[in-house]
Amino acid sequence: MFALIALPANTYLTWLCLTSADQVIELLTLLLFGYNASKGRFKLTLIFGFLLCFTRPAYWFAYLIIIYLIGKQVSKREDIWGKILKKFAAIWVLLAVLSFNQIVFNTPNLSSSSSDTFFFAQQKFHYLSLPKFDMDVFLQNGKSTKPDDVITGSSKFSFINNIKIRAALISIRENPQRFVFAEIQKLDSYFFIIQKVPNLPGQYELSANEDSINIRNERLTWSLTIGHLIFALYRAVWMFLFAATIVWLGLLVLSRNRFTGPEKFLLLPYTLGVLPLLIFYVETRFKICSELLATPLLLIASYNLKQLSKSKKLQDFLAKRY
């Protein structure tokens, strides 16, 4: 019942499904990917994971790991070539996509906007935008928001042809403290914050001379405020269950019990999703579907936590250790 309530209680995801077609496709393919992975259906998991990675390339990390684990599980009785084919099937798919992109689009990039996203995610005032303000709106003005201006007069990373990637690396090199603050904020926004990211609706812009923040239309309506509050409550409960799951997994390790349940696949898209978002940037819409997919495992973990804490193996281990 709690798992089923998670979708309508998640007001922001409901809003995204009503306003964003790509979010609906992402949610559909992710649920089918997670369902077939938990059932051990190798071919269907491979297909739906492949489609999922087209909706959001950040899922490639989870796709590679999950297909390897399922391939390892289902190829035990096959010969060496069969094992290699299934274990590394996602890698063959990735190489095929990269090759296709290189031949057709003359670039192996998995996303047409990756260099734009990378530049704004490493721009020196990124740490002032998220998690509070919408990054796309906030970073519209100022010299540091224009890649051509950033690279002008600099000889750093001159071997890189892509102007936006080069400008991003120059920004990191010249603003290491800002970069550290931005990365800390990304981790905080991904795992620990209960608010939607960006936190505030409305329009907030960095001034053209980059010394102040201009407040435009705040859009602080009651409908948005109440929806934000409901989402914060939902997220707080989710974080509590996630913390219980981490404790449960830790106790499994201490008691030397193996986590063999198929539900383990449901948490991987969320946990591995932090890797690409540290490279780029964190918004709730990028992780909201993978959070929902993990909900059944969080409930299973909470239910089993009390029983595991009474495990004789765990008690014997703690008695010997402490």
Image: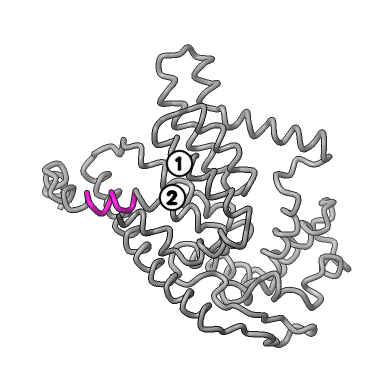
- Location of residue 307 in the rendering, given as x and y in whole percent from the top left corner: 16, 49
Please state which of residues 104 and 170 is positioned toward the viewer in this rendering.
Answer: 104
Ranked by sequence position, the earlier of labels 1 and 2 is 1
Q: Tell whether position 206 is magenta.
A: no
Image position of 165 (left or right of 125): right
Give the label on residue 293, or none. Answer: 2
As shown in the figure, which amino acid type bears the numbered disc 1?
Gly
Query: How many numbered markers are drawn?
Result: 2
Q: What element carries label 2?
A: helix
Tell me the residue that label 1 is attached to. Answer: 34
Q: Position of residue 5 (x, y in %)?
A: 36, 59
Q: Which residue is drawn at 51% across and 79% down?
A: 223
Is residue 213 in view? Answer: no
| Residue at far right of view | 153
Above or below residue 86? Residue 193 is below
Is residue 255 in view from this perspective?
A: yes
Q: Residue at x 59, y 77 (%)?
A: 201
Left or right: where 208 falls relative to 128: right
The CA span between labels 1 and 2 is 7 Å
Q: Is residue 53 left or right of residue 234?
A: right
Q: Do the residues labelled 1 and 2 touch (CB within 8 Å)?
A: yes
Dominant secondary structure of the residues highlighted in magenta in the image: helix
Q: Does the magenta stretch include residue 298?
A: yes
Please provide percent x and percent y for residue 247. Answer: 28, 55
Residue at x 72%, y 87% (from the top left corner): 211
For the residue labelled by badge 1, is the local secondary structure a helix, a strand or a loop? helix
Residue beneath the point at 63% across and 77% down: 128
Name the spot of residue 60 as percent of width and height, x first: 58, 42
Q: What stretch is highlighted in magenta?
A: 297-304
Q: Quadrant location of residue 136?
A: bottom right
- Looking at the picture, which amino acid does disc 2 mark? Leu
